Image (cartoon, rainbow, N blue to C red):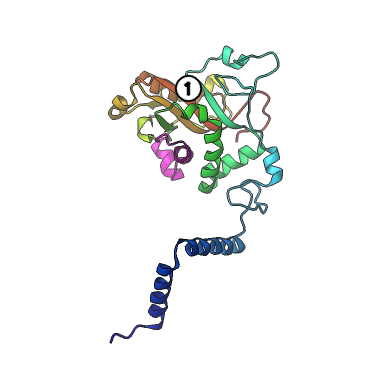
Amino acid sequence: MEQVAPARLHVHRLTGALARAGRGTLRALGTVGRAGLDYALPPTCMACARAVSEPGGLCAGCWRRLDFISAPLCERLGVPLREGESRLSAAALDHPPAYGRARAAVCFGEVARDLVHGLKYADRTDLADPLAGLMARAGAELTGGADALVPVPLHPRRLFKRRFNQSALLALGVERRSGVPMRPGWLARTRATTPQVGLDRAARAGNVAGAFEVPEAARGEVTGRRIVLVDDVLTTGATIDACAKALLRAGAERVDVLVFARVVDGTTTPIS
């Protein structure tokens, strides 16, 4: 008879026990395991690292400082309406965007900046899914009638350096919640651009002009589609406008925009 080593014997016994346990016991084991993990590595606030009750959450202080965007808001830009404005903001009338509608979960502020910077520059890819959850809720009216989510692409050199596209990670989270498929191959950045930080509106537009295109192989798929562009932050809208124009030139029926945070008039928090 084959002699079973003690370690292997324990494995065989444990496997048999689990097979006989049933789903209820397995769920209980999962709960115990989660409790043990939380004891060893207590969940912390996504923004300030204070202790919180659930992973992927914010502490009460950071939650209060996150400026959520809610109605009444501009139908085009998705910014809060000011007194005297109805349906469209003055900014939308003065500078109509190439896209149809934009929606953001929050106004850009200190907490939003810390979350975005953590995702983009500190390899905090764990932040993408919680932020995408807030975006999916804010953009439900856009995704409800959309055919595809298209993340704003990085230039290949930037992607190689960063190793991931934060917009694509956010789009994946929105896809999971909305059921709208992500199509990263529908838009490409064909020209490397300098960082937009510190540039005025005109300089930003010039910097990204002609920097995006729909690959020839994707043009047939883009034609007639209702697309939601996904990005982390919307500032002046120059990058998003350049992306929307490329998709519309390729035959997209409509292009809307969904971001985590957007800059509104009067924002004092620096982007960088």
> In the rendered view of the protein, which quadrant contains the N terminus?
bottom left
* Residue 248 appears in the rendering: yes
Q: Nearer the viewer, residue 176 or 110?
A: 176
The residue stretch that appears in magenta? 155-181
Quarter of the picture holding the C terminus: top right
Residue 147 belongs to the span the image colors magenta: no
Of 53 and 46, nearer the camera is 53
Could you tell me what secondary structure mostly forms the magenta stretch? helix
**Residue drawn at point x = 44 percent, y = 23 percent:** 255
**Residue at the image point whose x is 35% and y is 34% from the top:** 185
Residue 233 visible in the displayed image: no
Position of residue 196 measured from the top left corner of the image (x, y, whole percent): 53, 29
Q: Give coordinates of residue 121: x percent, y percent.
A: 54, 44
Q: Residue at x 44, y 43 (%)?
A: 164
The total number of labels drawn is 1
- Secondary structure beneath dot 1 equals helix
- Give x and y (percent) for residue 93: 58, 12
| Placement of 51 over or under 71, stated as above or below | below
What amino acid does circle 1 point to?
A: Asp
Is residue 180 rendered magenta in the image?
Answer: yes
Instruction: Find disc 1 in the rendering and name its residue.
Output: 241
